[in-house]
Image: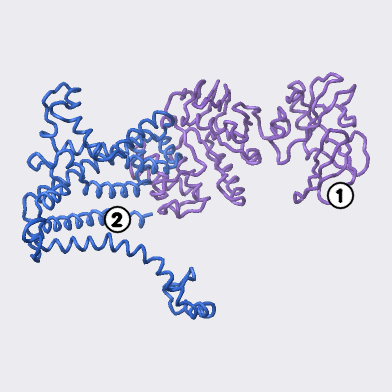
Chain colours: A blue, B purple
Amino acid sequence: MVQATSSPDTTSDVGTEAVPGARHDGASPDAAGLGRARAAAFVVPSMVLIVLFLVLPAAWTIYLGVTNYRLTGLAAAHPEIVGLDNYTTALGDDRFLTSLGLTLQFVLGSAVIGQAFLGFAIAWTLRDRRGPMRRVVEAFVLLAWILPGSVVAFLWIALLDRDAGTLNAVLHTPGAAWLLDHPMLSIIVFNTWRGTAFSMMLYSAALGNVPPSHLETAKLAGANTWQQLRDVVFPRIRGHILTNLLLISLWTFNDFSPYLITAGGPEQKSEILAVYVYKVALSGGQLGFGSAISFLMLLINLVLALVYLRMLGRRKEEA
Amino acid sequence: MAAITMSGLTKVYPNGVRALNALDLQIADGEFFALLGPSGCGKTTLLRTIAGLEVASGGTVQIGDTDVTGLPPGRRDVAMVFQDYALFPHMSVRDNIAYPLRIKKVDRRTRHGKAAETADGLGLAELLERRPAQLSGGQQQRVALARAMAYTPQVFLLDEPLSNLDARLRLEARTFLKRLQRDLGVTTVFVTHDQAEALALADRIAVMQGGRIRQVGTPVEVFRRPANTFVAGFIGSTPMNLIPATVRDGGIDVAGAVLPIPETAGEVTPGESITYGVRPEYLDYSPAERAGALSGEVVVVENLGSSSLVSLDLPGDAGTVQVVVPEGDEPQPGDRGWVVPKAGRALLYRDDELVAAPIPAQPAGANR
């Protein structure tokens, strides 16, 4: 609208000046013929939203990370800048380092091994099947994915509960305290169960891209299943595998739903970083310290993403 | 190298489609054999059943002296070249050619030597380090052939080997394939829907329709003496003229003209309805009236290059007859013309099946 009011003189020379103008710009030819100002007007609304809801909160978190801001008390009213104290405290804190270790276990166990492996196995097994069998399996796997986290958490507590849990009833092991004795294993299995659907669907689509004639050529040469996977399937879907691992690693790294099952316990044995931040910042009220840890998580996510993207990039060079 | 014997071979897909129907076929050792038919006739299913990529619902496949019906593809000692060549894009040409040897646990030096030797024979020596994406269509096809040849299987199976090449390259590749097969002497079965390709390449052809074999024979037999009207219509760049006719004493009434009973024909009884078949190439056109000729009005003249295809409307409801006329003699639409079958080339069909003379007379009649 702003451009429309100021346009009478500019529109008149668009016809004559368009070509020389484009020559001056050189690097960014105006393909749509809108003019820079009008083109920018189309972009501004989304940029405003991104800045408002993404960039500002992130910057705010970074700012909070260098203060002693608290939820209550004196520091809530008058936070002081404490420099990198929060970061040095976190990196020297056993509880943070243990939590980081548990998070890596959680990501490796439930995302990389659990979801990616199981998802591929299901996709590979179902690749040639049509009809009810495939639809039933897919429906159940998808159901686990689309249920709300709170519902799933309740289902798993009902399954693993010490006194009235379904698992104890099935295994005839009354009183076995799964959530207390194996908290990490419990949340790893839980997250695998919950998130496998995504990997399964992604790999199903990827396997559809493997030409049948390539698999059949390998079969005719006498290749067994492992050799077919190694020589035909994996090279073909390498990009899909890396993208999938990137996504599910990041999601799992930031996942908070294990808190709904174990609440990080017992004795912080299942306190992954997302849970740790929540406890420090909201239960403990140390918003400044919590922000610092959040920023550290962001950095770790960035490193993970860069590693995967580099691997993806190398694949493109090879191809 | 081995013969292939199929007996009672049946393939029914889970959705109920009967792709092969109690099929019997023998392919001799060293033969270049074509499976020809329209799409959906079962020819590709038959090839894949020989390869073991489809499991037969009934009947047996034998390669050499071994019954391979229950064997997995990898243990049948056959190599297949797919329509899309199926080269592995992440492997070099050398690794692609050596792949089956690698699976068979041949050591690296031997298999690379073998790959280089095979590639050399196919003119690929310069390309060993390249990736398939850097090759032309014809080169890709030769790499796929080299991969099949490198481990010297007993049988080659080719699925539509020429259909992914452009028209000019196709002729070149056809000649190349024929020479290669002759040099190697390996039993080779290929699938095609192109009758010209089958006639040009094969030692023998099986024409298929609806999961059954309608005729097996050499290209000459299939072209000159189609066993039924389906084969007659399918083989040849222009389909055979099939004209309803009636048998009279000492002759055949075809659209008002009385023609002699072809010497190739078996016994016919006067008065019966019959189909008179003759290829457009085996008719002589004449602008003047002749005895023993069909006559009609020229309706369409199509230029074929060195000759023209002329369509004549026959009197009554006998339809049209097509005739190939050499250059210079083309009539104009609206002209009246006469056509005479060449001696020994006309055929009679009763209920769509060839009415053939007794066996001993056939070769003489067919080759005259």
The residue where tag 1 is placed is B332
The chain identifier of the residue carrying mark 1 reads B
Q: Position of residue A29 (x, y in %)?
A: 45, 72
Q: Looking at the image, can residue A87 be seen?
A: no
Q: Residue at x 10, y 58 (%)?
A: A70
Numbered badge on residue A309 = 2
Q: Residue at x 87, y 26 (%)?
A: B252
Q: Amino acid at mark 2?
A: Leu
A225 relative position to B82: left or right: left
From this view, report whether residue A61 is shown above or below residue B63.
below
Q: Are marks 2 and 1 on the same chain?
A: no
Q: Looking at the image, can residue B184 be seen?
A: yes
Residue B181 sits in quarter: top right
Which quadrant, please, contains the N terminus of chain A?
bottom left
Q: Position of residue A248 (x, y in %)?
A: 27, 46
Q: Say what secondary structure mark 1 lies in.
A: loop
Q: Residues within 10 Å of mark 1 (few under 14, many from 20)?
A: some
